[in-house]
Image: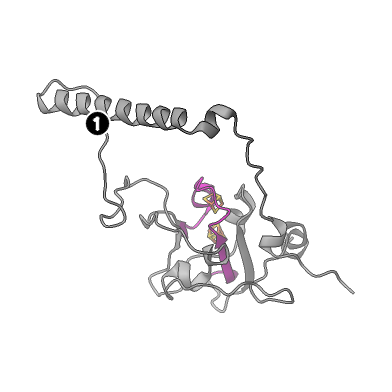
Amino acid sequence: MTAPTPNALERHPVKPVTRPVMRLRERVYLVELWKGLAITYRHFFVNLWRHTRRALGLGGLPGAVTIQFPEDPAVVAKRARTRHRLLKRDDGTPRCVACMMCETVCPAECIHIRAEESPVTVVEKRAKSFEIDLGLCVFCGYCVEACPVDAIRMDTGEVALSTGSREELLWTLPELLGDAPKKPHPVWPGGESEKRPEPREQKENTHG
Ligand code: SF4
Ligand code: SF4
């Protein structure tokens, strides 16, 4: 009897963080309050100075700008690495050829792909399932760099990815392709699960 395959949450369990013991000065509160206010005022006056200089045409560093997020959309640079998406060919089929390059290069081990034979002769394989766990992703962009067919990009501009549970951070193939809206995933059951990814060691043997 083979041992049950651990899922991503079991392989990356929550790490408890020990709270630091507060010293008397911190417990008194007022000292820390004034320290916080001092930082706030320092930023306020530095930014006031920078904005004033630029308003008078004297140049210098730009001051900080406050964005009323989430009411106003987040402004991110065009080349910022944001939420992933998978691209399609002109005929509507996914570009991904399940080469596993992105999964292999991913330092966070948060990409899980299952391959299957492609029905079209132009490519050998395609992804049967393709999952990215954004709870583990470090947004390094290596997966995009490694892809030989430009099938994955991080250019959606989406940065508001917070959820109420770790399971909802798992993005599946139809969601990454834009074929299905992102929906919450049920908590993975303790038993067998279709979505359960294989550990890397087993996958290496399978996909040789
Ligand atoms: S951005 Fe980096 S950490 Fe995130 S899925 Fe791609 S390779 Fe992995
Ligand atoms: S590197 Fe590109 S083609 Fe290969 S599995 Fe990843 S997304 Fe698919």
**Residue under pointer 1:** 63
In the image, 70 versus 62, the foreground residue is 70
Residue 35: % across, % down:
42, 27
Position above or below: 188 against 59: below
Q: Is residue 126 visible?
A: no
Left/right placement of residue 179 relative to residue 187 reads left
Residue 85: % across, % down:
44, 62
Left/right placement of residue 84 relative to residue 114 reads left
In the image, 35 versus 77, the foreground residue is 35
- Does 144 appear in magenta? yes
Residue 26: % across, % down:
53, 31
Say which residue appears at 50% left-offset and 64% top-offset: 164
Left/right placement of residue 108 relative to residue 173 reads right
- At label 1, which amino acid type do we have? Gly
| Residue range (magenta) | 123-152
Q: Residue furthest left?
A: 56
